[in-house]
Amino acid sequence: MFMDPKSILMISYYFPPEGSAAVYRSLRFLRGLVKNGWQATVVVCEPYQYERTDQQLLEQVPTTARIVRVKYRDPWHALQVWYGRRSKGKFPSSPVGATQRPVVGDQRSWRERLHGVVKLIEACVYRPDKFMRWIRPATREAIEICRRDRPSVIWTTIGPLSAGVVAYRTWKTTGIPYVLDFRDPWGLDYYPREAMRPTWARNVDKRTLSRMFEEARAVVFMFESVAQAYLRAFPALETAKIHILPNGFDGEVESFIHAPGDRCTVLYAGTLSSYRYDTLLEGLRQLKRRDQARAARLRVRFIGEGLGDLSTRVAALDIQDLVEIFPPTTSAEIRRCQREAHALLILGRTPGRTGHELVAGAKLFGYLQAGRPIVGIVPSDETRRILQQVGSELIAGVEDPEEIADMFEVLLKAWSNRTLDQLIPNRVACEAYSSSKQVSTLITALAGRPRADQWQERTL
């Protein structure tokens, strides 16, 4: 059968109506390729339960793309989902910020020990990750598509690493080349479940990933620092195959309009559990102690997951009047909240996480599009580098609550003087992360051509 040079099979475990940050990269690239005349089929997972359902995201999927949903079936995972739903029904969730009864020390310790044992067993049995049972049915579907449609290339986004295994196995059967796209540093002990595995299990996974690197047409990373880390860890990875393609956004950078309101609203949208915010809260407390009247004009609004401990810490520091906490909502509602906010907040990962300095949260790139001042409370990581690159002036060290309080004073002064537009990141620098400028780089990787900037010739 004739092979269309502009046809692609995309493999993405996460896809709408999943509403978590993991879906946006594959969705953005799919839209960009279709606009450039590509024919696309996408193999995605249909799990027992989505982490966050957002039906509105389905409206952004190109109608010409064929979406093949492969059911994920695993008895242990099904039991966990059932138990979670049962527990939620038995113990209704309280409003965010409500006081919760503490768990007795011995009971908590027993539960934590049991939870740790279960996670260790899962980490050893489920490899390369907890979605391993999706590999076989997804591979069968991908092979059938390749035999019938003969796409010119396979592209897969990782994580989970299972999606990369699907692409590798499909290539072994069909011979159609594949490109690996790493959203996160899988295979570098970045995730706790990887780090807790015994040495023998990590070695097996490393050999699997080495074979995937060796046979891939190209490998895409989001940052040069991540590429360097992989080159050190995996000799099988060839420098000439590497392409750098950070996250980005669809559309143009929005124009700034000073939002109305009697308080300066700073918005944080997304998951919080793996991000550090203790010094942010301490900085807010110092701000309140300096000038309670001025601090009262500030409102830091959190919307998303992993906010359970936040309300407890806010109450302990007596800053409830400065912080608002809301549950997750749709992407459309988040965009509306961004337009109403006066500034957007970005945080760094918790310091105990291996490789935390290599990544930047996906929300940062949505913030770059929003055309708002960005408040960065970050360590020396990729997030700080990007904020500095785009000329953001509101960056504070994550270890310095006093500097954080100073930064909020600068923001409040600009808000009061209606000069927030002077704190907006450089528009031209932000536009470099638009998907319209990234698709050409993606197409270069899909074709297996070398990078235009000659980065691969430099010593890493």
Image (cartoon, helix red, strand yellow):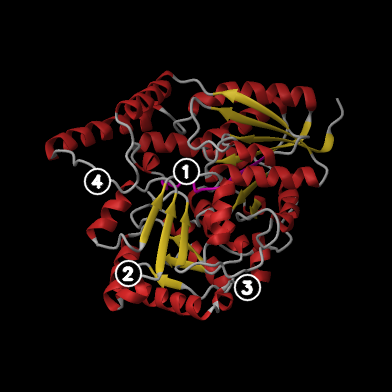
Residue 169 appears left or right of 377 = right
Q: Nearer the viewer, mark 4 or mark 1?
A: 4
Q: Name the residue carrying label 2.
A: 283
Amino acid type, mark 1: Gly
Give residue 187's mark. 1
N-terminal label among 2 and 1: 1
Residue 195 appears left or right of 71 = left
Label 1 neighbour load within 10 Å: few <14, some 14-19, many 20+:
many
Residue at screen point 54% across, 53% down = 362
Q: Name the residue carrying label 4.
A: 99
Q: Looking at the rendering, in which quadrant would you find the C terminus?
A: bottom right
N-terminal label among 3 and 4: 4
Label 3 vs label 1: CA separation?
35 Å
Amino acid type, mark 4: Thr
Label 2 vs label 3: CA separation?
27 Å
Q: Looking at the rendering, in which quadrant would you find the N terminus?
A: top right
Q: Which residues are magenta?
A: 179-190
Q: Secondary structure at mark 4?
A: loop
Of 37 and 402, nearer the camera is 402
Of 75 and 299, nearer the camera is 299
Q: Name the residue carrying label 3.
A: 426
Label 3 vs label 4: CA separation?
43 Å
Amino acid type, mark 2: Gly
